[in-house]
Image: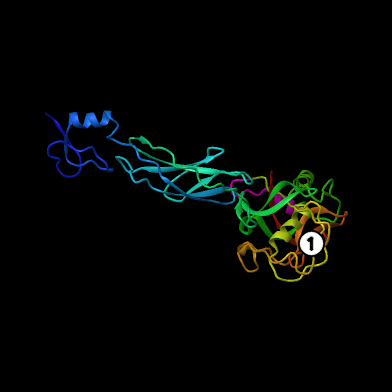
Amino acid sequence: MSIKQFPGGVIRGTPVVPTSSAATGIWTLDQAAANTKLGQWPRSPGAPTIGTATAGAVSATVAYTAPADTGSATPTYTATSSPGGFTGTGASPITVSGLTTGTAYTFTVRATNGAGTGPSSAASNSVTPALVIGDAFGGGFYAGQIGVGGVATHNLVIGPVASGQNASIKYKNANTAVPGADSVIDGPQNTADMVANGNSTVYPAAHFCNNASIGGFTDWYMPAKNELEVCYYNLKPMTSSNYPAGTNTNAVPSRGSNYTAGTPAQTSATAFQTGNAEAFTAAGYWSSTESAATYALRQSFSNGNQYLSTKINFNRVRCVRRLAI
């Protein structure tokens, strides 16, 4: 009778049903067929033991322990979210991406080998992804939220210094009016108004942001006054005292009073602290908000003051984008 040899030693007499991931001994085809028919060989893996799920910004990591019985071949592992059915694969801990901030998720893990997919683990603990100021997000970094009456409508993303900042650029090539660019909160519209009314020679800062392509995104714009103020409040680079300004009804939470000397404090996002890679500099940054025919508003990142600057001055600009909530 023909035989089929598997890795290992020789089984003499009646073979024993395999209980580990590799068969051992010499098997007849009949014996192999019989065990296959019974589902004993090849064999799918058992259920992993679930570990701890940990939330990130728009992702979570899921720890697990491999099952005692991994079946007849080395398995791969897949974590699946509930709700949403988002998945990730790999060794423990597995990263599951694409999650929504503010939504609670649990996760199960299953193992798969050539014989099939085993049963799911128990469900993990529940986690709710939440963005932290300074997190890598949306092609840049999470800078906070804007909204109306303290209710968030958008997440703000600040562009990276290397590709999203120009250190010396004019608002306009003349101290003359800009049709429509006067919103304190709608940076996209202010930017669109400037782009529609002149080329990059006329409106250098607006075109710099409008033309940016960063992280696969092309919807960058020049931030309006209240958007740029949120960036200062959350990403203040220095430890210096604040100017008595900062009222911002579009901030989340809404701010109806001025800063104190120590609030806001220096940001806890290390990369944005003075001297580090993503830090704002103390000098003024253009907002896209026009104040008068001659002036536009800019934001100091040393003390938080927002003040007028003639449009032909050279200041910094840093692109942002917004994501609806």
What color scheme is it? rainbow
Left or right for 30, reference 155:
left
Disc 1 residue crowd, few under 14, some 14–19, many 20+, Cα 10 Å: some
For the point 86% across and 55% down, the residue is 291
For the point 20% across and 39% down, the residue is 6
Q: Can residue 311 be seen in this view?
A: no
Q: Is residue 74 magenta?
A: no
> What's drawn in magenta, residue-wise?
205-217
Left or right for 20, reference 290:
left
Q: Where is mark 1, residue-wise?
A: 313
Q: Is residue 31 visible?
A: yes
The picture places residue 318, in percent across and down from the top left corner, at: 69, 56
- Under mark 1, the amino acid is Asn
Q: Quadrant of the N terminus?
A: top left
For the point 80% across and 48% down, the residue is 149
Q: Find residue 323 and report its image quarter.
A: top right
Q: Provide the secondary structure element on which disc 1 rests.
A: loop
The picture places residue 165, in percent across and down from the top left corner, at: 67, 57
Q: In this view, does 219 lie above or below 176?
A: above
Q: Is residue 33 above or below residue 252?
A: above
- View extreme (bottom): residue: 240
Q: In which quarter of the image is the C terminus?
A: top right
For the point 44% across and 39% down, the residue is 120
The picture places residue 268, in percent across and down from the top left corner, at: 64, 64
The picture places residue 296, in percent across and down from the top left corner, at: 82, 56
Instruction: Looking at the picture, tell me which residue is in the foreground, 192 or 13.
Output: 13
Left or right for 149, reference 51:
right
Instruction: Looking at the picture, tell me which residue is in the foreground, 82 or 88.
Output: 82
Query: How many marks can you see?
Result: 1
